[in-house]
Amino acid sequence: MDKIIQEVQKQHMKEEVPSFSVGDIVRVEYLIKEGKNERVQPFIGQVIQFKGHGIGKTFAVRRMVQGEGVERTFPLHSPRVVNVTVERGPNRQPRRAKLFYLRDRAGRSAQL
């Protein structure tokens, strides 16, 4: 049974997965549907988490908008995620796999 599920999941996974890690500042281009129209909306922020494996792998991106923190979780293999590009790496390498401690910080200290 597990082999059948794995084969179906392989068919729906992306061929080329972008290479980025926790702490990188990325630009995620996401396909938004508004009525009949579809457009690509960019979301630029810092990757704070990877979760899951296989086709269910997700990553969370956090950014500051007018002093408020905004987080969004994207499925890595979703057809709605058009492109993920690394804007720049972190100033220093994080020592944690999940950067939830950045939620409590404000201003310049909220980034690595």
Image (cartoon, rainbow, N blue to C red):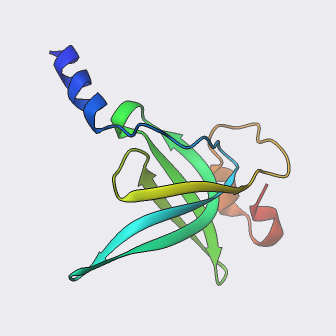
As drawn, is 106 to the left or to the right of 43?
A: right
Q: Quadrant of residue 93?
A: top right
At 60% from the left and 40% from the top, the residue drawn is 19
> Which of the two residues, 80 or 52, is positioned nearer the viewer here?
80
Q: Is residue 61 left or right of residue 4?
A: right
Task: Tell me the quarter of the image containing the N terminus.
Answer: top left
Identify whether 51 is placed above or below 109.
above
Residue sitting at x 69%, y 51%? 24
Residue 64, by quadrant, is bottom right
Q: Is residue 34 left or right of residue 16?
A: left
* Closest to the observer, 76 or 67: 76
* Camera-side residue of 48 and 81: 81
- How far from the left and from the top, in percent, is residue 39? 38, 76
Residue at x-position 64% and y-position 42%: 21
Question: How many numbered discs?
Answer: 0
Above or below for 31 versus 53: below
Residue found farthest to the right: 92
Quadrant of the image occupied by residue 67: bottom right
Residue 12 spot, x, y in % from top left: 28, 38
Who's the residue at 64% across and 37% down the image? 97
Q: Is residue 97 above or below residue 86?
A: above
Return the x and y of residue 13 as percentages of the image width and height.
34, 37
The quadrant of the image that shows the C terminus is bottom right
Of 39 and 97, the residue lying toward us: 39
x and y percentages locating residue 94 in the rendered image: 76, 42
